[in-house]
Image (cartoon, rainbow, N blue to C red):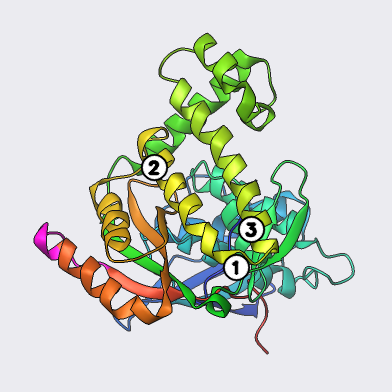
Amino acid sequence: FVLPCALPHRTAVAVRPRDDGNLAIATLGSDGRLHTSPVLSLARLQPGDPTGWAAYPAGVAWALRGAGFALPGADLLIVGEVPTGAGLSSSHALECATALALLDTAGRAPGATGGPGLAETARRVQRAENDFAGAPTGLLDQTASLRCTEAHALFFDVRSGAAEQIPFAPLSAGLELLVIDTRAKHSHSESGYGDRRRGCERAAELLGVKALRDVSQSDLDTNLPSLPEDLRPLVRHVVTENARVLATVELLRAGRYDELGEILTASHVSLRDDYRVSCRELDLAVDASLEAGASGARMIGGGFGGSAIALIPTEHRTSIERHVLDAFERHTLTAPRLFTAVPSAGAGRDR
């Protein structure tokens, strides 16, 4: 179970159809310069070619063609404001916008006759990320980028595909979600994510279940001793985190925003101590925001760097931001980027 909301930050993909079966990709960098990749033949795309940033939009084209969508070719121009390397799913924002653009050129836009649904589109984007770009991601980020709606969080059951829009308007309770982009990115992030995923899969196999979500919290005391010691904290995190998601959904349904903070912080402690994907910068962001009056805070994303979120009283935002910045300065760390997250709508077409 996952419960994301989409940010207002955007990645836009302008598209012009081609009729020669080729894909040309350009991106407007933050330096104001245009960066282009070599023109690619859609029929010859394969994992490992191209590499670098172009692998993400090219991988989407490859995945869509593999699913039977006849793409005529396209020129793509990409421009975005989603911070990269911040654990805020910038790659998925790019991939989802690319998917919608390419499907539109083929007359197969989601919701149109013959077009895939958003859930299927998310799975194609996942395949592009997993099999073409080589990143072992799940379905959370793609689904959030495509299916979130304004002023809601998306309660998503990854196994069944069931989704429910849960009203999420913290401003109504005098609260805001402060995003703290630590600007930290550690070299072992991708390998560490994969290691933990493989550990969870191994633990599920040893326990005789399809996935760790099939282990109940009440069964932990019975099941954990039967596992190798290195797998126990991974199982404990996954099982308790699922319980925290379900508890958060019930609190949001009841509008009990004042009780969310404790769950957020407990989630971070579990990510830090059991799943072991936090880092010095993320822990400092969480600790400093709590010291300054946040009701709760946790890291987000894959870990080992990136961003944390803190649920804060709107009236104390300035003092909390100042305290976080001062804490990073005292620890001689790069100043974090701070902004408020407003639950926003996912990807769509601008006319």
Q: Which residue is mark 3?
A: 251
The quadrant holding residue 340 is bottom left
| Left or right: 68 as drawn, with respect to 290 | right
Q: Residue at x 28, y 61 (%)?
A: 182
Q: Residue 289 versus residue 182: which sits nearer the camera?
A: 289
Q: Earlier in the sequence, mark 3 or mark 1?
A: 1
Judged from the image, the secondary structure of the residue bearing numbered disc 3 is helix
Give the number of marks.
3
**Residue at far top of view:** 226
In reply to whether residue 156 is colored magenta, the answer given is no
Image quadrant where one finds the N terminus: top right
Rendered view: 232 above or below 84: above
| Discs 2/1, front | 2
Q: Are marks 3 and 2 in contact (CB under 8 Å)?
A: no
Residue at mark 2: 269
Residue at 36% from the left image edge and 35% from the top image edge? 273
**Which one is in front in this view, the residue at disc 3 or the one at disc 1?**
3
Q: Amino acid at mark 3?
A: Leu
Looking at the picture, which amino acid does disc 2 mark?
Answer: Val
Residue 280 seen by the camera: yes
What residue is pinned by disc 1? Answer: 98
Give the residue at x 69% y 45%. Answer: 158
For the magenta stretch, what is the residue range? 329-336
Q: Which of the two residues, 44 or 303, is positioned nearer the viewer here? A: 303
Measured as percent of width and height from the top left, residue 212 is found at 62, 28
Question: CA gap, disc 3 to disc 1?
Answer: 35 Å
> In the picture shown, does residue 262 fall above or below 130?
below
Tell me the crowding category of disc 2: few under 14, some 14 to 19, or many 20 or more residues within 10 angstroms, Cα based: many
Question: SS at mark 1?
Answer: helix
Which tag, 3 or 2, sits closer to the chain's start?
3
Instruction: Assign the magenta stretch its main secondary structure.
Output: loop
Q: Amino acid at mark 1?
A: Thr
